Amino acid sequence: MNQQTTNSMKILGKETVNYQDKLYYIYRRIRVTQLKTEYVSELKEFWLCDIVIRGRYQNEDDSFLFLREISDAVVISQI
């Protein structure tokens, strides 16, 4: 589980996150208070997510973000 600030935007109705030069979409977002930490990896596997990060998202409470990679995306530097 990683904790880092991310940049986000919406593409085709899905919230996306640029994290470690890869593009992911947010499959699920769960507040830390709603989930015991020991179940995070089980949910990651159950929901077929590639990565889980923990942090604040758009000024909300501390959350777990379950992310799926958009493998065909090419991240380029911003203009």
Image (cartoon, helix red, strand yellow):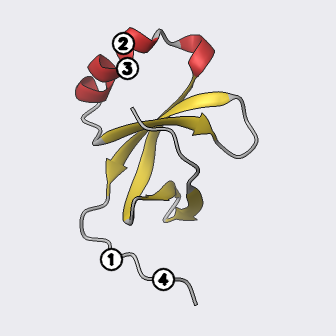
Percent coordinates x, y for residue 70 in the rendering = 31, 60
Q: Is residue 13 left or right of residue 25?
A: right
Residue position marked by numbered label 4 in the rendering:
77
Residue position marked by numbered label 3 in the rendering:
40
Q: Are marks 2 and 3 in contact (CB under 8 Å)?
A: yes
Q: Which mark, by number, is residue 49?
A: none
At 39% from the left and 43% from the top, the residue drawn is 67
Q: Amino acid at mark 1?
A: Val
Disc 4 from disc 2: Cα separation: 36 Å
Q: Amino acid at mark 3?
A: Val
Disc 4 from disc 1: Cα separation: 10 Å
Which tag, 3 or 1, sits closer to the chain's start?
A: 3
Residue position marked by numbered label 2 in the rendering:
39
Q: Amino acid at mark 4?
A: Ser
Percent coordinates x, y for residue 73 in the rendering = 32, 72
Q: Amino acid at mark 2?
A: Tyr
* Front tag of 4 and 2: 4
Mark 4 neighbour class, 10 Å CA radius: few under 14, some 14 to 19, many 20 or more: few
Which tag, 3 or 4, sits closer to the chain's start?
A: 3
At 57% from the left and 13% from the top, the residue drawn is 34
Residue 15 drawn above or below residue 41? below
